[in-house]
Amino acid sequence: MDYDETNEKDIELIELIRKDFPVTKKKIYMNCGSFAPMPLSTIKSITDFLVRCSEDGPDSTSVQEFITSLMKELRILLSQFINCEPEEIVFTQSTTEGLNIVASGIEWKKQDLIIARGGLHEHYANYFPWLNISKKFGVKLEEITIDNKGFFDLGMIDKIAKSNNAKLITLSHVLYNNGAIMPVEEVGKIAKRYNMLYSIDAAQSLGTVNVDVKKIGCDFLAFPGFKWICGPPGIGVFYCKRESAELLTPQYIGGESAIITEENNLVYTDSPQKFQTGFRNYVGIAGLASSLKYIQRLGINTIRKMNMKVANEIIEQLKTISGVSIFGPEDEKLRTSIVSFALDSINPKNMVATLQERGIIVAERDVVGGGRKKAVRASPHFFNVSNEGSEFVENIKAIQNMSG
């Protein structure tokens, strides 16, 4: 696909989109890998929900019936989005919570082995839970060696997975620090071959690339609503394959997640309720449903085309700057719109702060685990346009010139 072609319809669409995101009138916001702004329609859905609760009473029959229908609708939307059953969708607070449901829910034995891509090169949300399990239960954590782009040798995973004790493989779908797209389907085939559990951190992929849990072959997948889907904060999603839900014991238990039998025994209810005890972020449900509809109306292929056009232009212009290092794959098929780079002469933290003073919002992130090497990370989304990419790079050049 040629991501650089723009026709008249594309221009009209971008103009309409930018009206939905007020931030575009004031700033150049390229930090969707951290936290994306919400469209006005989502903000309205949130306020409409709160007004309805205020007028009818939050625990009235009418509002509770509305909440039930809203949750059912969102589960259907999400199941269509990632190709699963509605009952396999669990609402959480974040990606981190979803991954911890897996790590803390499995009955680990000392001889078990976890295969994890990259160790500290993974986002801490998908490294610390497994590291904690290895220290707590004496489980072996095998950290797969990676190259300078974050990729790994599939043969090495296959070799380790042959072990009778290999229980779970975990990795990110898209790397948070350089946007590289991992070969999740190929890893899924290895997991299936050796009857291993397979867990995915999809925080940086949902809303930017197609995600099909059936094709990936994963048991578990977690993602937030507030990054690339442009939903509200404090709402996440955990996909739990129906058959694999039986292998997890929830960390918490309450009235929504269990029943008590006549023999005074506690029995867990079926998923998703099994993992949702005490859940009350209904306003987040309202917002996420609205944002997801917005994303689906545009279509992931259209979004990727728009995202990659801006990202590719940023990369090409960055290459003209002396002393710049650009991280991540050169092949656009192997990356998302995340662009990470560093300059020899300027600390990334200082660059990010100076850009923010100039109305350009990006982030500082590790590109080598444990903070050993930092980078400036831009993560543009479909509401960004080419001239913003050019202005971003021109400001980088100006800051470099000022620093001498």
Image: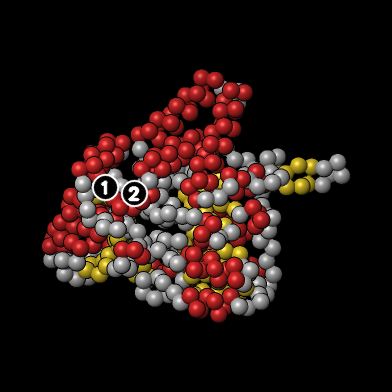
Total count of labels:
2
Q: Secondary structure at mark 1?
A: loop
**x 52%, y 75%: residue:** 157
Q: Secondary structure at mark 2?
A: helix
Residue furthest out toward the right: 263
Q: Is residue 93 visible?
A: no
Mark 1 residue type = Asn
Mark 2 residue type = Ile
> Looking at the picture, how far across and down is residue 355, in whole percent?
23, 53
Mark 2 burial class by Cα count in 10 Å: few <14, some 14-19, many 20+:
some
**x 55%, y 60%: residue:** 218
> Quadrant of the image for the N terminus?
bottom left
Relative to 299, 161 lies left or right: right
Residue furthest out toward the top: 55
Relative to 153, 305 lies left or right: left
Is the Cβ of the residue at disc 1 closer than 8 Å to that at disc 2?
no
**x 69%, y 46%: residue:** 270
Relative to the observer, which residue lies in front, 386 or 36? 386
Reading the chain from its start, which is encountered first: label 1 or label 2? 2
> Looking at the picture, how far across and down is residue 62, in whole percent?
58, 23
Residue denoted by label 2: 303
> Looking at the picture, how far across and down is residue 135, in whole percent?
61, 70
Distance of label 1 from label 2 (alpha carbons): 11 Å
The label shown at residue 384 is: 1
> Looking at the picture, how far across and down is residue 194, in whole percent?
62, 72
Relative to the observer, which residue lies in front, 137 or 74? 74
**Mark 1, mark 2: which one is toward the viewer?**
2
Report which quarter residue 392 is drawn in.
bottom left
